[in-house]
Amino acid sequence: MFGLGWPEVGIIAIVAILIFGPKKIPELGGVLGKSLRNFQEGMKKSNEDDHSDKENFD
Protein backbone atom coordinates (compact mmCIF):
# COMPACT_ATOMS: atom_id res chain seq x y z
CA MET A 1 0.00 0.00 0.00
CA PHE A 2 2.02 2.97 -1.34
CA GLY A 3 5.25 1.48 -0.01
CA LEU A 4 4.08 1.78 3.61
CA GLY A 5 4.59 -1.00 6.13
CA TRP A 6 2.36 -1.83 9.06
CA PRO A 7 4.35 0.33 11.53
CA GLU A 8 3.86 3.41 9.32
CA VAL A 9 0.15 2.67 8.85
CA GLY A 10 -0.21 2.31 12.62
CA ILE A 11 1.48 5.64 13.26
CA ILE A 12 -0.75 7.34 10.67
CA ALA A 13 -3.84 5.79 12.32
CA ILE A 14 -2.77 6.99 15.78
CA VAL A 15 -2.14 10.50 14.49
CA ALA A 16 -5.54 10.52 12.73
CA ILE A 17 -7.27 9.46 15.96
CA LEU A 18 -5.47 12.19 17.89
CA ILE A 19 -6.38 14.85 15.32
CA PHE A 20 -9.98 13.90 14.50
CA GLY A 21 -11.06 11.84 17.49
CA PRO A 22 -12.37 8.29 17.48
CA LYS A 23 -15.98 9.28 16.76
CA LYS A 24 -15.12 11.19 13.58
CA ILE A 25 -12.94 8.47 11.95
CA PRO A 26 -15.82 6.25 10.66
CA GLU A 27 -17.54 9.31 9.17
CA LEU A 28 -14.33 10.37 7.43
CA GLY A 29 -13.85 6.82 6.15
CA GLY A 30 -17.33 6.82 4.64
CA VAL A 31 -16.75 10.15 2.93
CA LEU A 32 -13.40 8.96 1.60
CA GLY A 33 -14.97 5.74 0.31
CA LYS A 34 -17.74 7.62 -1.50
CA SER A 35 -15.21 10.01 -3.01
CA LEU A 36 -13.03 7.17 -4.30
CA ARG A 37 -16.07 5.36 -5.72
CA ASN A 38 -17.21 8.49 -7.56
CA PHE A 39 -13.69 9.04 -8.88
CA GLN A 40 -13.50 5.45 -10.18
CA GLU A 41 -16.92 5.75 -11.84
CA GLY A 42 -15.84 8.99 -13.49
CA MET A 43 -12.63 7.40 -14.77
CA LYS A 44 -14.56 4.40 -16.10
CA LYS A 45 -17.08 6.66 -17.82
CA SER A 46 -14.26 8.74 -19.29
CA ASN A 47 -12.57 5.62 -20.66
CA GLU A 48 -15.85 4.42 -22.18
CA ASP A 49 -16.37 7.82 -23.81
CA ASP A 50 -12.84 7.79 -25.22
CA HIS A 51 -13.35 4.29 -26.56
CA SER A 52 -16.65 5.19 -28.25
CA ASP A 53 -15.08 8.34 -29.76
CA LYS A 54 -12.30 6.26 -31.31
CA GLU A 55 -14.88 3.89 -32.85
CA ASN A 56 -16.68 6.82 -34.45
CA PHE A 57 -13.50 8.00 -36.17
CA ASP A 58 -12.56 4.54 -37.54
Image: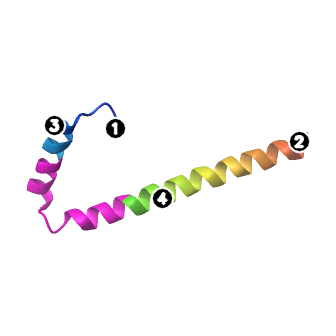
Residue 57 has which mark? 2
Amino acid carrying mark 2 in the image: Phe
Point out residue 31 in the picture as x, y percentages from the top left corner: 35, 64
Mark 3 and 4 residues: CB-CB less than 8 Å, in contact? no
Q: Earlier in the sequence, mark 2 or mark 3?
A: 3
Q: Amino acid at mark 1?
A: Met
**Distance (Cα) linking label 1 and label 4:** 18 Å
User: In what element is the residue under mark 1?
Assistant: loop
Cα separation, mark 2 vs mark 4, equals 31 Å
Q: Which mark is residue 37?
A: 4
Tell me the CA gap for discs 1 and 2.
Answer: 39 Å
Q: Residues within 10 Å of mark 4 (few under 14, many from 20)?
A: few
Which mark is drawn over residue 1? Answer: 1
Residue type at mark 3 is Pro
In the rendered structure, the answer to whether residue 30 lies left or right of residue 42 reads left
Which of the two labelled residues, at mark 1 and mark 2, occupies the earlier sequence position?
1
Give the image quarter of residue 6: top left
Q: Amino acid at mark 4?
A: Arg
Q: What residue is drawn where x is 8% and y is 54%? A: 18
Identify the mark nearer the N-term, 2 or 4: 4
Q: Could you tell me how far apart the alpha carbons at marks 2 and 3 are, in whole angstroms?
A: 51 Å
Q: Are marks 1 and 4 in contact (CB under 8 Å)?
A: no
Does 41 appear above or below 23?
Answer: above
Q: Earlier in the sequence, mark 3 or mark 4?
A: 3
For the N terminus, the quadrant is top left
- Label 3 vs label 1: CA separation? 12 Å
Considering depth in this image, is 4 or 32 the residue closer to the camera? 4
- Specify start and end residues of the magenta stretch as a single range: 13-32
Q: Which residue is mark 3?
A: 7
The local secondary structure at tag 2 comes to helix
